[in-house]
Amino acid sequence: MQLGGFSGGVYAVCNWFVRLAYVNVLWIFFSMIGLFIFGFFPATVAMLATLRQFVKGNQPPIFKTFWSYYKAEFLKSNRFGLIIFIMGIILYTNFNFLQTLQGELATALYYGTIVVSCVLLLTVCHLLASYVEFEQPMKTHIKNAILITTGYPLSSLMIIFGFVAVYYVNLWINGIGFFFSGSLLAMAILLSAKTTYQKIEASQTTLKQEKTV
């Protein structure tokens, strides 16, 4: 049965909410299966890859799609997840150490570490988006993620807005985080990345046209 007009719009919105909730619950469940340490990154990649299919307009079975990505990316995603985890531990240790120091230099280093941490988080978000979008070597994913984080601030602002929005929604509505926190952030990452990729593609097309003139 085809729905049109207002009814069709309501159905589409409700359908998206159901998808986001289902994928978010799968993300939490499969993270727990891997004891979070080994399950978080495969589950996150599977969540992004599954939602990407819906962003593209496809309608795959959610559980089957999520599980297939989780299995396929378990080892590979944990390898770069380990690198990110080590970098996070280093920054966290640095935070704790700088808090014990006094003086202007220590304060400057403390806030500098905060900036580095924020840039690292945004780079990881862009890295994950690139990872599920393109078949490339990991070095290329990392390079592209750094270039987008530093060269396309609008993309990073969209991701920051996603984090802020999820934070306040969780404050206002108790318990909603279990159903939507991860999937909403994933959508913010995917949509910001999609916008950026379109801009890059348009710029490359313009450059090619200018060279042929």
Image (tube, rainbow, N blue to C red):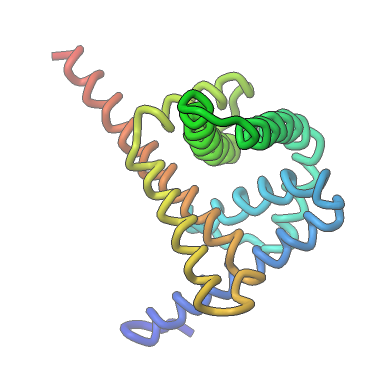
Residue in view at x 43 percent, y 32 percent: 149
For this orientation, the residue located farthest to the left is: 213
Q: Is residue 126 visible?
A: no
Where is the C terminus found, in terms of image quarters? top left
Q: Position of residue 124 (x, y in %)?
A: 57, 36
Task: Please give left or right for residue 210 compared with residue 136 in the image.
Answer: left
Q: Is 160 situated left or right of 208 in this image?
A: right
Front in this rendered view, residue 76 or 178: 178
Q: Is residue 183 above or below residue 97?
A: below
The residue depicted at 45 percent of the width and 76 percent of the height is 13
Is 6 on the left-hand or right-hand side of 90? left
In this view, the residue in front, 74 or 154, is: 154
70, 165: nearer the viewer: 165
Q: Is residue 159 above or below residue 205?
A: below
In-image side of 197 versus 60 (left or right): left
The residue lying at 74 percent from left, 61 percent from top is: 28
Q: Is residue 115 visible?
A: yes
Q: Is residue 127 above or below residue 64?
A: above
User: Picture coordinates of residue 98 (x, y %)?
Assistant: 61, 31
| In the depicted structure, whether residue 15 falls above or below residue 74 | below
Q: Nearer the viewer, residue 17 or 145?
A: 145
Give coordinates of residue 21: x percent, y percent.
Answer: 62, 71
Residue at image x 45%, y 58%? 164
Residue 39 percent coordinates (x, y): 80, 48
